[in-house]
Amino acid sequence: MKPAVTDHVEIKKYDHPTGGWGSLSSLIRKAYGEGLLMSGIWSTLLKQNKADGYMCVSCSWAKPAEPRPFEFCENGAKATLWDQTKLRCGPDFFARHSVTELLDWPDCELEKQGRLTDPLRYNAVTDRYEPVSWNEAFAEIGMELRRLDPKSVVFYTSGRASLEASFMYQLFARIYGSSNLPDSSNMCHESTSVGLPRSIGSPVGTVQLEDFSQCDMMFFFGHNTGVTAPRLLHPLQEARERNVPVFTFNPLPERGLKRFKNPQNPVDMLSPGPGTKMSSDFFQVRGGGDIAAMTGIAKAVLALDDAAREQGSSRILDIGFIAEHTHGFAEFEAYLRAAAWDDIVARSGIARPDLEHVAEVYSRSNAVIGNYGMGLTQHRHGTENVQMLCNLLLMRGNMGKPGAGISPLRGHSNVQGQRTVGISEKPELVPLDKFAEFYAFEPPREKGLDTVETCEGVIAGSVKGFVGLGGNFVRAVPETGLVEKAWRRLGLHVEIATKLNRSHLL
């Protein structure tokens, strides 16, 4: 039976805070739907994000040194329930449904069928997936890999894969002769990996959990915290209760950065109020207008510094820090002075007095954190977005001190770890000499294909084979329609997965 499919999506207005009773009731409904309400899943959740437990697969927010009794959020618990479901998707399901039929199913309905139970091979004659033994699967995949040029085969990794599996996977690909090892971070924080080293010399953020309790102001750019990193709402709520200003710039007025009730705080839950106001000011920046907004703030800070110099007051800019720890400030200053306010307002969609207000508060703050998400990075100018936020922080020395720094909010809990164990298409990021020494083979030294280059290769026909360790590659990349049409020309398509998704059906 085919699930009901409709082009009409009804989005209900939600006026309640993030968290609260709505969060608890939604979690219970999810546990019931997965057949886990009366199971041992609750004891499993008690170990989530604990030092002696396991990392949540829902986001990348760090494990605290002193965890709460329940160190999980609604989304994280749902992700665990989703993985631990008792539902199974076995050969009987594929006997009932052709691949052509399943292509019309919504993605969510495909995954709802449960965990895959058997190795499966597509039969073009019957248009169905049919079970095979593990030995058959290994033999046929190996035969195809031997037939193909290793440089034409891509080994993709999702951030959901474990470190151990990721290490073995990249080693397998390199022994085979391929350095085509793109991963999901190519499509989420690649601009962070490029932009941050250029600005601060490191591809990762500088902020630790302890900094959130020491900051006296925060920026948020391009991040829906209540959806993508809800456990961040706890330190954010604590900061707001200290009257720390939080300036949020986002096209979407997401509830998590408006109001929050902490489900782990009985007083908060039983209070009749609307919850904690999470953003002191929320600015609905125009899509693609982030650089303009940051330029306006920086330009206003520069004007405040000019006024302070004229009055003989203390400088607003951290001149000592700029002189000792930065380069290129003169060019940046010239850019700011040349920027016209009319252009800044038109491109950002934010009024000049609002940007000047943010700059005035920023100029009085001594420890500022710049948080950002994929609203900045998944963008034509993603690298420049990241660097502009760094520039804004560097103007007042908000790097390398308690309560301050740059905080990229990543999507998966394991993408940084995967890079550490060798998942990368860039040879300079991988200890190839050590691999050669320890495992007695000569790994390929040339740069491999990243995610975008993989898509281009599939469309052009130069990519002949694709092996995926988790993920839903075709759905995750841009120009999905173009990639889908070309995907069927691949000579080899292997997916190592726990649940069915659309990429498996192409």
Image (cartoon, rainbow, N blue to C red):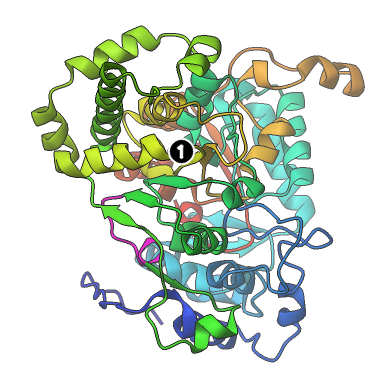
Residue 294 percent location from the top left of the image: 30, 33
Along the line of sight, which residue is nearer the eye, 437 or 246? 246
Along the line of sight, which residue is nearer the eye, 337 or 46? 337
In the rendered image, the vertical position of residue 457 relative to residue 371, given as above or below: above
Q: Which residue is mark 1?
A: 187
What is the magenta segment's predominant secondary structure?
loop
Residue 494 percent location from the top left of the image: 60, 46
The quarter of the displayed image where residue 349 is located: top left
Residue 491 percent location from the top left of the image: 52, 36
Q: Which residues are magenta?
A: 250-258
Q: Report how many numbered discs are placed on residues in the image.
A: 1
| Direction from residue 226 to residue 172 in the image, left or right | right
Label 1 residue SS: helix
The quarter of the displayed image where residue 488 is located: top left
Along the line of sight, which residue is nearer the eye, 455 or 383? 383
Can residue 458 be seen? Answer: yes
Image quarter of the N terminus: bottom left
Membership of 253 in magenta stretch? yes
- Report the residue at 24% width, 24% height from top: 303
- Report the residue at 28% width, 33% height from top: 297
| Direction from residue 189 to residue 3 in the image, left or right | left
